[in-house]
Image (tube, rainbow, N blue to C red):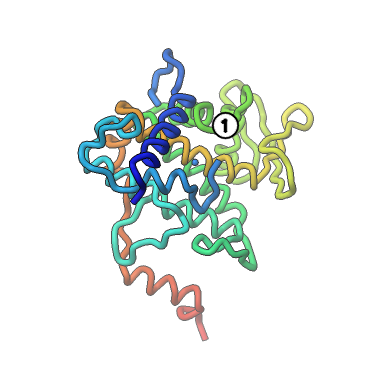
Amino acid sequence: MFGRAARDRTASCAFALARLVRPRADSRVRTNRSSAFGSSLTEQARQPAAEPLNSPFGHNMNRKTINHIDRFFKAPSDPPYVPGTNSVLHLLRRDVVQCLGRDPQTGLKLSNIALFPGIMGIIAGVDLLAKFHAGQDGSGAGSRFEEFVRTYFRPVRSGWDRIIWQFRNSLLHSFGLHSKDNKGRMYHFRLNLDDCPLLRKRGGDKYYVGITPLHERFESAVSLYEFSVRADSMLQANFERMYPTYGTIRIRSSFMTALEKIRSGGFAEP
């Protein structure tokens, strides 16, 4: 357990960071650079605290909310509970890491990748977090998504929220890496695994998307959002509104047994 001075420093840093990403006052919704395997500051912030948590970092959160946040933002390097109830975000982040060619628990390089499912997982993760951030899951998915990108994808350039939303549509709707917005503008995307920026425009409607920066920016956004939720009572209320529907999923041991048989070829025809 950390000493009082360390806890105070952690709380002060997190509160200051949350203030930096607080949305504009006229925004309609209130609102970790960490690797896929967590950060020391995040892990310190996850340590148990007395109830209520009387600090700028906790905003008098009750024990149930603390437990929900701790579970939801569990590091992808931690194994899931099998059988047991797991964070949807935790499982998604683990799958993204594995699809992009790393073991989610060890970080070791794997022999192959599943590029499209990995990228789609990142985009689905932004969709998921945008619901929690806004505290609602009704109409307006595009505005929720873009607001989350503007707030937590740091640094973000003007117009990137709209372009990443169109990239999302090109993957999840057409799978063809092209999309058209409601004004008739076309967007054509190319994937880049080389050392490159998150977005690079070439020509009138062609965009190169850096996969590694996209994953890094997503993981950073997860951490920034976690810090903000822990420091902002309105974001906590939004989070709790979505948690019963989107927070957890239960894994049964029989499911994992079947999955291991599929991976080992146990269900294949002789």
Indicate the position of residue 138 as horizontal and vertical percent values. 35, 30
Secondary structure type for disc 1: loop
Residue at the disc numbered 1:
154
* In front of the other: 201 or 65: 65
For disc 1, the neighbor class at 10 Å (few under 14, some 14 to 19, many from 20) is some
* In front of the other: 163 or 39: 39
Please, what is the three-letter code of the amino acid marked with disc 1? Answer: Arg
In this view, 98 is above or below 132: below
Kindly indicate the quadrant of the structure image that contains residue 129. top left
- Tell me the residue at 53%/51% (across/down): 36
Residue that extends furthest to the top in the rendered view of this protein: 26
Relative side of 205 to 13, left or right? right
Indicate the position of residue 78 as horizontal and vertical percent values. 42, 59
* In front of the other: 204 or 59: 59
Indicate the position of residue 56 as horizontal and vertical percent values. 33, 29
Relative side of 181 to 65, left or right? right
- Tell me the residue at 46%/17% (across/down): 24
- Tell me the residue at 60%/30% (across/down): 155
Indicate the position of residue 112 as horizontal and vertical percent values. 64, 65
